[in-house]
Amino acid sequence: MVYQLVGSRFKKRFYMLLTITLFLMLVVLAISLVIPGPAWAEPTATLEISGDGVARPVVLTLAELTAMEQYEHVYSTINTWPTKRWYTARGVKLRDLLALAEIKDEATLVRFVSSDGYDVTLTVKELLKDKRYYFPGLKDNHPSDGSIPGSSDGAQEVEPILALVSAEGIDDPAAMNERDALLLVLGQRAVTEQTNNLFLKYVSRIEVTTTTPEKWDSPKANIPSGTVLPVGTQIKLSNKHNNEDKIYYTTDGSTPTVNSPMFNWSASRWWDQRGDVEGINKPIEIKKDTIIKMITIGPGKEDSDVVTFTFTADLTGKVVDPTKVPGGPPTEVTLDRNAINRPIGSTFQLEATVAPFNATEQDVIWKSSDTRVATVDNRGLVTVVGPGTAVITVATVVGNHTATCIVNGPDEEANSEHVDPAVAGSQEKQPPQYPAEPFQETQHPPVSGDSQTDASGNTSQGDGYTEHQVAEDRARYLARIEDLAASMQRHELQQQSPEMWQVFEMSADTIPLPLQEKHDCMTAVVFVILFIGGAGRRYAEYVKEQ
């Protein structure tokens, strides 16, 4: 009797524990169905090398790449946060790959495209002709802060490669675990050069072209050249983009190079996340009569022209720092261009300068005389949408001082023949990247842009995108209003409709789960309910049997 009672209780507990265990397992299963895991890109299957810059386009398999001579080295790099780090990589030299495709002497640009849609462009000069190095003393002085230069002692020249095996953040070859992802890896030309945003992963295509490289915009100073300044005045430098393009300068009269001091250590996309921008982008303090020479250097374009600013130091103490004294209302506004010819669908950035530089009101208004030819947003980004001529006007809010730029939209037939090389590189179409961690700046969707560049866009610093926050900061969305307007206006022209389109901005909260995931969730819940019901019914039958 006692044995039966004990056995009965044991069975009841056993069935109860079994039911609970199965229930918990099903809960875990349901969660795994509802919450998607990380998305992993497929290993590169082939590599295509093409373009008018090669005489023999080729397609290589992983097996063929592996059979080629392999090059292995440690690489030093800095991202645009900035943060210093190591990469260890083994792969095929880029010059060997391009030689295999018989790169032409007139080739100028090399564009790397990843299987997930991101791309990086470099000039042939900076990729194959400029010497690049591994700096073992990169982390001297400060292990992570890229704004503090490391030592260039012991520099070792390295080759740019497409890595088949690599490891990020470590200099131990035994730690290489990323395989068959074809990572673009290259050295630094200077110990301060920020190259990590160029480390494009999942490279599937290399396009070599003979297109004339555009030139980076020349940098500016916040105070006009020739100004007499009190000792201690802070000179701040800037350029249009302030991201991968960096300002290098000298104060000793020499011509600046990539080895000169850098001004804008942190890319502008990080500025709203940093409270120390003034410390990162250190102004130049006037202590004596000073000549500042500066240049913009960045990937994929030719270096800008060298700009020279001269300042006279006042030792009498009678001159007031103009940056600390309001300059009154605007007296003039000017544009960096007064006429331009561009193909339909292209964009370019106009830059307005309000005088005096310390005017109390710097706000301006942009408008187009014919939105069927060209549109302009509130930052001066112009989009050519149709043939004809339009006048872009910028006006100061105070004083209504104006400046104009004539935009000529060519006929559709001549669309490809009227590209203005001076501004052809102003089309930045990389969407913003919001890395999970500031130092992660790889080129594919952040786990990093960083950086590298998405084939379709960048942040809102002058590139035409507008970022909007929705309620409770639950999501961001992007809207390129001018692109929408351009598309609509082209449609209007084609349809010959007399009606004008209106463009509205819209936002919506993010949906926690995609539709399919919702279905998976419901299926899992139903399954759990049915299981519990079945288990409970079986347990009740068991109790009756006892």
Image (spheres, grey):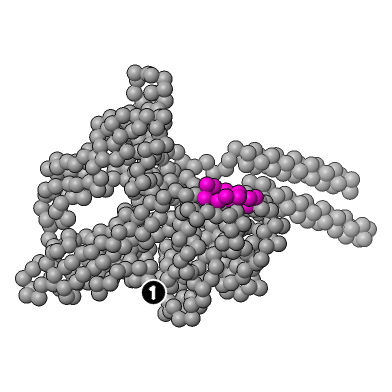
Q: Amino acid at mark 1?
A: Ile
Residue 470 % position (x, y): 41, 44
Identify the residue under disc 1.
148
Residue 419 % position (x, y): 37, 41
Question: Left or right: where does residue 266 sit relative to residue 407?
Answer: right
Dividing the image into 4 quarters, which one contains the N terminus? bottom right
Quarter holding residue 535: top right
- Residue 376 seen in this snapshot: no
Residue plotted at (49% across, 47% down): 455
- The residue segment tinted magenta is 47-59
Question: Left or right: where does residue 291 sit relative to residue 276?
Answer: left
- Residue 267 colored in magenta in the image: no
Question: Left or right: where does residue 75 sit relative to residue 219?
Answer: right
**Residue sitting at the far front:** 105
Tell me the element at label 1: loop
Residue plotted at (41% across, 52% down): 213
- Near-viewer residue (104 or 516): 104
Quarter holding residue 62: bottom right
Residue plotted at (33% across, 71% down): 261
